[in-house]
Image: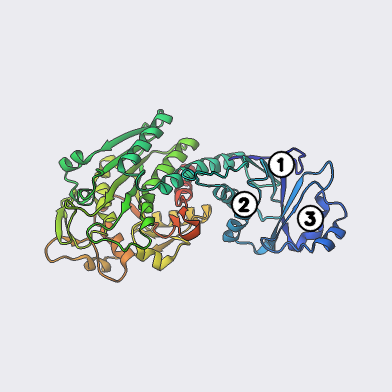
Amino acid sequence: MKLNITSHAFEKQNGTFHVSLVDEEQLQQQLQTLAITQPDQWLELSQYKAKFDETQLLIQQSNHAPALFLVGLGKARAIAGHKLIKLAHSIIKSLQNKAEKIILDLSALPQQFHYHFALALTQASYSFNQYKSKKTETILQEISFFASHLSTTQLAFIAAIHKGQNFTRDLGNQPGNICFPEYLAEQALVLAQEFPDLLKVTILDEKDMAELGMNAFLAVSQGSERPGRVVILEYSAQLEQKPVVLVGKGVTFDTGGISIKPAAGMDEMKFDMCGAATVLGVIRALCESRLAIKVVGALACAENMPSGKATRPGDIVTTLSGQTVEILNTDAEGRLVLCDTLTYIQRYDPELVIDIATLTGACVVALGQVVSGLFSADNTLANDLIEAGEQSFDRVWRLPVMEDYQELLDSPVADMGNIGGRFGGAITAACFLHRFTQEYRWAHLDIAGTAWLQGAQKGATGRPVPLLMQFLANRVQD
């Protein structure tokens, strides 16, 4: 999707639609500026009120006027971020097969929402039809913004996020028979070939992990015929600064292992690698935007399957950190691949570490699918992530990682169990990870509720790529 700024509100070209956001409180005045002949008469006949998400398409008002698409804001002064997402989908759904180019008049939209709306339009334009025999092709290629408070720099940054977020969504939407640990490793190598001046990739196989002592990770991957991988991507490694390290859970399919999940909805467990997909998407967006910041991405890639080689409930493993874990539930596997990876990345001397994981159903129960769960004992880091979430409208909500919860992980036979009982499941999962992150500043994002949608709209969302890109951009500006 090409994004640019135009100084021309109307442009008569084949395949171009003029889209105007309309404030119901300023409807008469706005219509006077649009290419509508006899607006009073038109209003009476059409009964158009510019209520929220009320649309009206007008084709060829005259030989010199472009096709016009009106989109109601309702009361513009009362508009909110979540409503802009709905408007963006309405525009894209209505025009993506009719227009090659949209000229979008933002003059009625409050200035503080221009960036959010442009980003929402790119997100709404995504489609995934790779495996459909009859593909529906969209013709929309370009959006030009008129009367906007967007800069070319902002649009370039949005375009970079768009490419990174689409990459994440494409990876997340791949089925488990295509996307397995080796596949994610291959995608990292392909990305490095595309940006050889910016990226360096290192891949650990299971032999490497065994020699290092990453036994918690191997306890998950050993049940599958698809071997696990730890994939390290170093962006701008030449910069003389400590890196921000992003660690992504990459469980390419999660059956639950011996603690097998119910059949209903198990198809969605292909999305359990969306943390790793997020890291790959952020790295792509960084390469597209060329932000001057040193970042290391680490993908903890495994498939969790039941087999004769699979870990049993009650097994005890020694992690790379030397701490021992009693595996009480093999379906709490994400924290096992993450804990060893979080220990491994200490060798990069991180400035801070953020892990991203579809970790717990408990987080979905607590927060639904609106915001991601944020856990950190570092108030400054947590506040920076919260701020970046508001700026990108990819929001988070902070939950505790208090020491009070740690005793729920106690085991009589090991240093800890890998689950903490019925209560506070998202919190105890974060507390488990916290035991492996004492050497650096750390935050955990539980994206189990936000990484994908269910039902008829099933598919990866690409969150939290916008949040993390905004967070990294803010660090560059600081």
Q: Secondary structure at mark 2?
A: helix
Amino acid identity at mark 1: Thr
Closer to us: 408 or 461: 461
Among the 4 quarters of the image, the one containing residue 71: bottom right
Of residue 67 and residue 165, the one placed in the foreground of this image is 67
Residue 408 position in % (x across, y down): 23, 68
Q: Which mark is residue 16?
A: 1
- Dot 1: what SS? strand
Mark earlier in primary sequence (1, 2):
1
Q: Quadrant of residue 244?
A: top left
Q: In the image, what residue type sits under mark 2?
A: Lys
Image marks 1 and 2: residues in contact by CB distance under 8 Å: no
Whole-Å distance between the Cαs marked 1 and 2? 15 Å
- Is residue 478 visible in the rendered image? The answer is no
Residue in the picture at 16% in, 52% down: 308
Residue assigned mark 3: 30
